Amino acid sequence: MVTPLIDTSAGNAQAFCHPTSTAARLGAAQRAGLAIHALAGSKPIARLAEGHDVSRKFVYEQKAKASEALQETFTSPADDQKVLFHLPVTKDWVRQFVLAQVLIGHTSFRGVTEILDAVLDYRDLSIATVHNIIQDAVDPARRISNAQDLSGIRVGAHDEIYQGRRPVLVGADIRTTFCYLLAIEDYCDETTWGVHLLDLAERHLRPDRTIADGGKALRAGQAAAWGDVPCNGDVFHAERHLGRLAYYLDNRAAGCTAARQKLEDRMTRLKRRGKGHILSKRLAVARQAEQKAVRLAGDVRVLAEWMQNDILCLAGPPLAARRELYAFVCQELQQREPLCPHRIGPVRRMLKSHQENLLAFAGVLDERFDDVAQRLKVPLPLVHAVSEWLGTDPNTAAHWQQHGRLCRAWGDKFRPIEHAVREILAETPRASSIIENLNSRLRNYFFLRRHIGDAYLHLLRFFLNHRRFLRSERPERVGKSPAELLTGQPHPHWLQLLGYEPFHRN
């Protein structure tokens, strides 16, 4: 009697492979891989069997085992009552919990007490106690923040945000996002800005330049406090104003088109009754208005794209060429201003009055490109050509055609130039987007002022500077705090800096 390879006498599908067969020699990892491929259906069963030198029945058996294991894993009830770890709840731990809930979770004081009641059955914490815990953290946070050396900040960003009717003055480092100024005042005039910047200068803050919007008081205060430190314009606001203007004119043109179509529909209905001439004049006027609106919207949209993609772009032509293009855009806007004076006029005047501030970054690029040309002993126009090439879309054929021409023309010198230009472009900010991001985060904490007054800003500044980034578009920031990025030195957890001992699982 021949012994069967598969025993199915008791409903058992266990395979008994001959010890010398290929199937018997397959390891666990190989069987698992075979089962995964069979489940995925990436290849026919016959081809899988042929590729592993086994029978199709064997492949089906491995597939069934894997399917059964998956079914059991996802349908078996989890052991939710298993104790993961024990937490010693002390008063010190409760204080840390309160700080974490308020600063990380943006939880209200009443919400903190409710969470402790709901999760820990702890009802001994009043709203007043929560207030005291937060208030007690303000002084050590202020001392740590005021002791920070600011000499490592090279480019700062300044702005004003409003909490109710009172302005909050904000300053941060572009590179690390370290917030060195966060103060609420009654006014945001030249004197107020100057006093704060003078205080920061005593902590060795002397940046190479700053970036800010068109606020006159801010710039005047910086000039009074820091003298010749330049304050570059924030291109974000200029591009946003131009974008909004183009968007408004696009919508107006669309409205004119809709009005013309509506009149044409009415005229079609009236023609059937022999009264089409009634709307002839109105329709002619509507068509003329539509043509003007569409032409104006198209022209302004092109000018806005030129400003964003060719003039205020980071990788672009030298400063002199940008100035000519900038003046051309302003001139074209002025010619079209009578067609929509209440919208085009303010934008055109803003662009004209802030031209040098908005193009200041291009002057910085020119200086650094000149240094590269002298260091690598290459013509300055070549460095600018590499910069303009880096500003083109790498998904286009023109980008790689230009790349080929530069490589053939300069050979081994091209790579060092490209590396230097890329580094310069990455280190030359044009906008105070760091401040805009910081402002959006600050607004989530303004509820604290109702409880502890204006002193909460000291605690917020400390927390934002010492809280480590969980994620970032810049990999060098992940896992580090702004303070660590600024100083290059690690520091304890922010709760430890405030005098607490964070809980660690054994």
Image: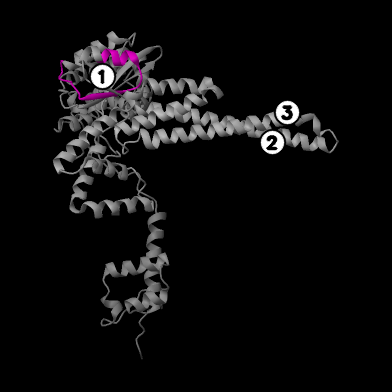
Give the mark nearer the N terminus: 3 vs 1.
1
Q: In the image, which is nearer the foreground, mark 3 or mark 1?
A: 3
Viewer-nearest of discs 1 and 2:
2
Q: Secondary structure at mark 1?
A: strand
Residue 120 percent location from the top left of the image: 33, 30
Q: Mark 2 near mark 3, Cβ–Cβ under 8 Å? A: no
* Closer-to-camera residue (130/51): 51
Residue 215: within the magenta? yes
Residue pushed farthest bottom?
1
Please state which of residues 314 and 124 is positioned toward the viewer in this rendering: 314
Q: Which region shows up in magenta? A: 202-222
Note whether 5 is above or below 456 in the view shown: below
The type of residue carrying mark 3 is: Arg
Give me the C-alpha separation between circle 3 and circle 1: 59 Å
* Residue at 31% across, 29% down: 434
Q: Label 1: which residue?
A: 181
Task: Left or right? Give the position of 287 relative to 234.
Answer: right
Quadrant for residue 191, please give it.
Answer: top left
- Quick check: marks 3 and 1 in contact, CB under 8 Å? no
Q: Which amino acid type corresponds to the residue marked 1 in the rendered image?
A: Leu
Amino acid type shown at disc 2: Gln
Quarter of the rendering occupied by the N terminus: bottom left
Q: Which mark is residue 261?
A: 2
* Residue 60 position within the rendered picture, expressed as x and y whole percent measured from the top left: 40, 73
Label ID, residue 129: none
In magenta stretch: residue 231:
no
The label nearer to you, 2 versus 3, is 3
Residue 440 shown left or right of residue 408 in the figure? right
Q: Which mark is residue 282?
A: 3
- Residue 314, image x, y percentages: 31, 36
Identify the residue at horizontal 39%, vertical 37% (top origin): 309
Under circle 2, the secondary element is: helix
